């Protein structure tokens, strides 16, 4: 291994560590990787871990500096995480600097902004699936046969657990009345709701012949 | 300090409302979810889910993109802070 090459793979290991840490709470790696706040978080961690590694290889006791490089890198990442997550400076019992709080706040910012991106993905998925549902059944607005198929689909998806068929029928009647009032397309509204409620059902419906 | 008070308020409010607590847990587990998905996955009546969502938004735990059950929901920073406290 060339001297200094550890500074190239350290950021990659930090990236892997942060992805594993955050994917527990963000259900989409794509949303995480598209989030600029995440990359800033990674940059801060990488710089801090790089600094820790530098001090370990240059300023520490020779016994530590002689450890194998993978071990030093691991200690740099774990040590950085530990320090960043607990660094608090108190004067007179009052917190003057609370780095852990800033880091926690920023981590939550990464999580909420990633969740917003997940919503964007979900909305695109709903639009895509509802269009495909309408295409698959050849929906034609105002045709009784098309509307009957959409009613049946709604009943199939929304009749679950202890729900009664008449409750579901009341919901369908309400959707129809709302569509008439707003001039909306009944088929589109039902397809969208079904795609929101049960994406897995829609997947198997679309995959079926 | 204000956040600590908000967390305590949200915590005690969720302890008294199992349905809202389930809705909040569901959203946290998926990072985000449409209202109608919550209804179906939790097997709740739409009115129950909707009132839970209103309550959770009122407590500052959820942010919405859209209205009612047609909206999409995700946790706020306060919601994640509540999760970190580990008292859900």
Image (cartoon, grey):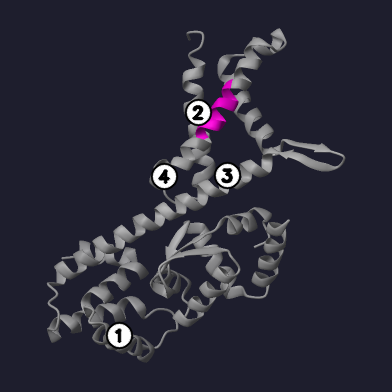
Q: In this view, does A135 lie above or below A151?
A: above
Give the dominant element type of the magenta stretch: helix, strand or loop: helix
Subunit of label 4: A
Q: Is mark 4 on a helix, strand or loop?
A: helix
Residue where numbered disc 4 is placed: A29
Crowding around mark 4 (Cα neighbors within 10 Å: few <14, some 14 to 19, many 20+) is some
Comes first in the chain, label 3 or label 2: 2
Q: Give the range drawn in magenta.
A: A42-50
Farthest right residue? A92
Subunit of label 3: A
User: Do residues under tags 4 and 1 come within 8 Å of each other at their CB atoms?
Assistant: no
User: Do residues under tags 3 and 4 come within 8 Å of each other at their CB atoms?
Assistant: no
Drawn side of residue B31 relative to residue A85, left or right: left
Crowding around mark 1 (Cα neighbors within 10 Å: few <14, some 14 to 19, many 20+) is some
Query: Quadrant of residue A121 in the image?
Result: bottom left
- Residue A13 disc label: 2
User: Do residues under tags 3 and 1 come within 8 Å of each other at their CB atoms?
Assistant: no
Q: What element carries label 3?
A: helix
Badge 3 and badge 2 both on one subunit:
yes
Residue where numbered disc 3 is placed: A106
Q: Give the image location of residue B42, x and y in percent.
A: 48, 72
Q: What element carries label 1?
A: helix
């Amino acid at each position: 291994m060339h001297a200094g090459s550890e500074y190239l793979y350290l950021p990659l290991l930090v990236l892997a560590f942060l992805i594993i840490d955050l994917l527990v709470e963000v259900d989409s790696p794509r949303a995480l990787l598209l989030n600029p706040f995440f990359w800033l978080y990674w940059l801060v961690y990488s710089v801090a871990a790089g600094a820790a590694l530098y001090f370990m290889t240059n300023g520490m006791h020779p016994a530590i500096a002689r450890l194998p490089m993978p071990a030093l890198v691991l200690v740099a990442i774990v040590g950085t995480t530990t320090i960043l997550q607990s660094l608090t400076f108190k004067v007179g019992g009052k917190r003057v600097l609370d780095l852990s709080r800033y880091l926690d706040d920023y981590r939550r910012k990464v999580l909420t902004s990633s969740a917003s991106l997940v919503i964007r993905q979900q909305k695109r998925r709903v639009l895509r699936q509802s269009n495909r549902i309408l295409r698959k059944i050849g929906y034609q607005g105002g045709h009784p046969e098309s509307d009957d198929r959409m009613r049946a689909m709604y009943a199939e998806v929304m009749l679950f657990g202890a729900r009664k068929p008449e409750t579901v029928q009341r919901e369908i009647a309400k959707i129809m009345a709302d569509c008439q009032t707003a001039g909306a397309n009944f088929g589109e509204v039902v397809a969208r709701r079904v795609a929101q409620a049960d994406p897995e059902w829609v997947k198997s419906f679309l995959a079926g012949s | 300090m204000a956040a600590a008070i908000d967390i305590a308020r949200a915590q005690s409010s969720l302890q008294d409302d199992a349905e809202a607590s389930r809705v909040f847990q569901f959203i946290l587990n998926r990072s985000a979810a449409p209202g109608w998905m919550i209804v179906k996955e939790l097997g709740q009546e739409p009115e129950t889910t909707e009132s839970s969502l209103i309550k959770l938004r009122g407590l500052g735990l959820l942010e919405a993109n859209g209205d009612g059950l047609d909206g999409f929901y995700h946790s706020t920073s306060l919601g994640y802070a509540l999760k970190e406290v580990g008292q859900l």
